[in-house]
Image: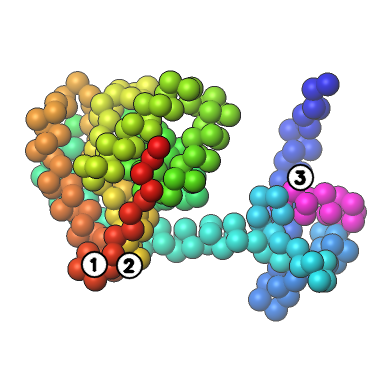
Amino acid sequence: MRRRQPPNGEAQSSVEKALRILTCFSPEEPELGVSEIARRLGIGVSTAHRLLSFMIGEDFVRQNPATAKYSLGYRVVHLASTVLAGANFRTACQPHMRTLRDETSETVRAYILAGRECICVEEVVGVHEIRASGAFGQAAPLYVGAGGKMLLSQLPAGDVDQIVSDGRTQGWLTHASEGRLREELKAIQRRGYAQTLGDTEDLAASIAAPVRNFTGAAIGSLVITGPVGRWTEKKIGEFVPNLIKAATAISSELGYSAGWTPRPKPTEVK
């Protein structure tokens, strides 16, 4: 039997209630019981319990086994840290992106790692305007485009396996494309940068280098992108040194120092 899909209005109402649950918590009241949450939102206890159960599964809330009360989960902390990190990341990236644009005449983008996706948080349009996926404000899976693949190549093997598995479940990846992706991730790990030549529907070519924070973790990627018809292996070779130089400078401003912080070595993709 197919599961009944709720009408749009019903789904929207559930989303609104779930978001309102998050606003019930505060530093003064970090833990609340289901009855108190239901009372504050003006909903039934059974409805509140159903929504909380779903939110526990997504790690938006946690339940204290000793008191049965609820508190905010680590997913909320991650989202908040992503916003704060993104602000510093953009500030550090902007001047170097403009310099890189002037050096190459191409569009330069900065992506930040956000869970199992990457988000374009800054864009400096080049002389040759393009229409390519992953533009400012857009999120994309880590297995799409040079910026995402650069970040995916730096994650632990277990995380890579889970992300790839999700991609197959959602129909984005096939058995064949998974194999090609894993080989590509190995190549990225070896050479230290990612490159794509028209592997997205807009036929954009891109190269990406990692941006690291003070721990040495790759928190973002710096990307040069342009139309595949104008890019050659020779042009990519000319762009790479400037790209890596800019990404290294941004990493330094974010506290990364290769001299005293060991660069974490991701487990090689199988």
At mark 3, the secondary structure is: helix
Q: Nearer the viewer, mark 2 or mark 3?
A: 2
Residue 118 lies in the magenta-colored region: no
Q: CA distance from mark 2 to mark 3?
A: 40 Å
Sequence-wise first label, 1 or 2? 2
Q: Please, what is the three-letter code of the amino acid marked with disc 1?
A: Ser
**Residue that badge 1 annotates:** 257
* Place of residue 89 in the rendered image (x, y in percent of width and height, measured from the top left): 34, 59
**Residue that badge 3 annotates:** 14
**Residue that badge 2 annotates:** 214
Q: CA distance from mark 1 to mark 3?
A: 46 Å
Picture residue at 36% right of the left edge, 44% below the top: 268
User: Can residue 123 be seen in this snapshot?
Assistant: no
The residue range painted magenta reads 42-55
Q: Is residue 75 above or below residue 116?
A: below
Picture residue at 24% right of the left edge, 38% below the top: 207
Q: Is residue 4 above or below residue 50?
A: above
Which one is in front, 151 or 104? Answer: 151
* Image quarter hosting the C terminus: top left
Q: Evaluate if marks 1 and 3 touch, with contact meaning CB atoms under 8 Å apart.
A: no
